[in-house]
Amino acid sequence: MRTSIATVCLSGTLVEKLHACAAAGFDGVEVFEPDLVACPSSPEEIRALADRLGLTLDLYQPMRDVEGVTEEQFADVLRRAEAKFALMQRLGMDLVLCCSNVGTATIDDDEVSASQLRRLGDLAQGYGVRIAFEALAWGRYVDDYRRAWRIVELADHPAVGTCLDSFHVLSRGHDPSAIEQIPGEKIFFLQLADAPALSMDVLSWSRHHRLFPGEGSFDLPTFVSHVLRTGYDGPLSLEVFNDTFRQTDTRRTAVHALRSLRWLEDAAARLVPERHDVRQLKEAAAPTGFDFVEIKAEDTSELEVLLGQLGLTPRGRHRTKPVTLWSAGDVRVVLNEQHARGEAPHLAAVGLQVPDASATSLRAAELVAPPAHRRTYATEQVIDAVVAPDGTEVYWVDAVAGEPAWVEEFEHGTAPGPTGIGRVDHVNLAQPWDVLDEAVLFHTSVLGLEAQASTQVAGPNGLVRSHVMRSPDGAVSLPLNVAPPVQAHLDQHVAVSCDDVVGLARSARRRGLAFLPVPDNYYEDLSARFGLAAEVVAELQDLDLLYDRDDDGEFVHFYTRTVGQVFLEVVERRAGYAGFGAPNAPVRLAAQSAATH
């Protein structure tokens, strides 16, 4: 199906928005009237630019307060409408969005509204224009798509149809299944937006907090499937009012938007397989585990000491690059000094094991994920990768038993021995404030991870907001954390699992590992909260271990000091504990903040 986007979704001028939409790969745009009014280019110039860029101008919007008014007021509606229709002729546009009346309606009568839309349709038809009538969720009288359709049906005019907007339907909790009773040819346009589950007035919710599909709580695939079953064959169009998107890079947001629409079209297509004109993406299964993590820096020697103290084994240096490999169990840590002048240690890449690497690569390309490029020689394994919204490179390889083939590219190392370390448990990735929603969509759509409920943790410099992205079987977890700028780097770390955290902590301490110090007050509170035996609390306190417990099991863990912008965590999960020790996060953040001053 054709794709479209409202210019209100993007930052910049109208000309910049058109260029960004074309570059991203959209087929058309909705022209938001304030964007045109503020544009120095004439309507004819905008029309010509869209033609050159290969964009259709699909919908002019909005036209407000057109029905449910007195005859005197309606005369003014016709005057405004005629000027609008003449402008649309200059733009080469044939569809205008008319919203249900919010400000001037005084007559709550479907027959009156239908009559006025019919007369408006007569005027529009003379200019080659059609009217798409939409029920706003906060309309004075018409706030339900079913009533809007009833009025359109009563109007019975070929130039009058309805516009369906997912936000206005789903934010009010209306049942979208009745959409299937509307003839597809009378649905003139479809606007799509997601949104988080919030408790606030619907107008503010709409104007500031809409999201692109796949980022919020609405069931958009089912919503779109209802529309598709009517036979609707117009564009799938995004209309997202969001304060963040209106401030971020225009071209990047346009690509982000198209990715969301392709994800949604694919999800809807799987619900309506009879619609062969709706595109399905390459299906790719979620990752089954971590393959490696990469830490990059100009000088990684301090990290080598830290890894050795934890018990990881140096596996050698890459035969063509200034890169070393350390491992223990199924944990592989790559230390990369290539092209890293002036860079402090930071998490640069994550490698994942997937059931079918070629399928994941095809899906990533279809979702316009930007590829990551690294020079690879003929004798080296080529590993596909993309760049996540936060800049982290994400690689994937086919899952294999034992070690992956690329490990053989590291030479003159030591064979690993038993350490008690199992696998990478999770990787925390710090997110800039303006990319979190994009990152959630990226990891769900491209990698098949599932977004868990958002949580907030209080730190000494403000709240840290976290979204955990997890594979269906829990083998891969990527907590995405947005922290205040002064402590953002404190949420970038690698956690590894073990089967005896107490024993591993004692061994690491004997090798000289400096643990993140935990205050005595924490252990007094721990004893009171959980009623642990005094000797258990004493052992935890002696080793700077942290503890949590829920109905499913226990969680014991410790943190290393921070090196550059990264630190390590060692965890032991007992029974069915599946969390991340969130109650301990404020203690960790405070200790790390104190260590940096």
Image (cartoon, rainbow, N blue to C red):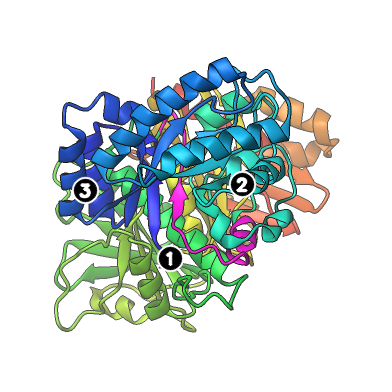
Residue 238, given in percent of the width and then of the height, sits at 45, 47
Dot 3: what SS? helix
Residue beneath the point at 82% across and 39% down: 532
Location of mark 3 (residue)? 50
Residue 353, given in percent of the width and then of the height, sits at 45, 72
Instruction: State which quadrant residue 194 falls in.
Output: top right
How many numbered dots are placed on residues in this image?
Answer: 3
Label 1: few (<14), some or many (≥20) within 10 Å?
some
Q: Is residue 228 magenta?
A: yes
Residue beneath the point at 41% across and 78% down: 359
Query: Is 68 placed left or right of 568 in the picture?
Result: right
Mark found first going from the N terminus, 2 or 1: 1
Instruction: State which quadrant residue 291 falls in.
Output: bottom left
Dot 1: what SS? loop
Residue 395, given in percent of the width and then of the height, sits at 35, 66
**How far, Cα to Cα, is label 3 from label 2?**
57 Å
Residue 492 visible, this orientation = no
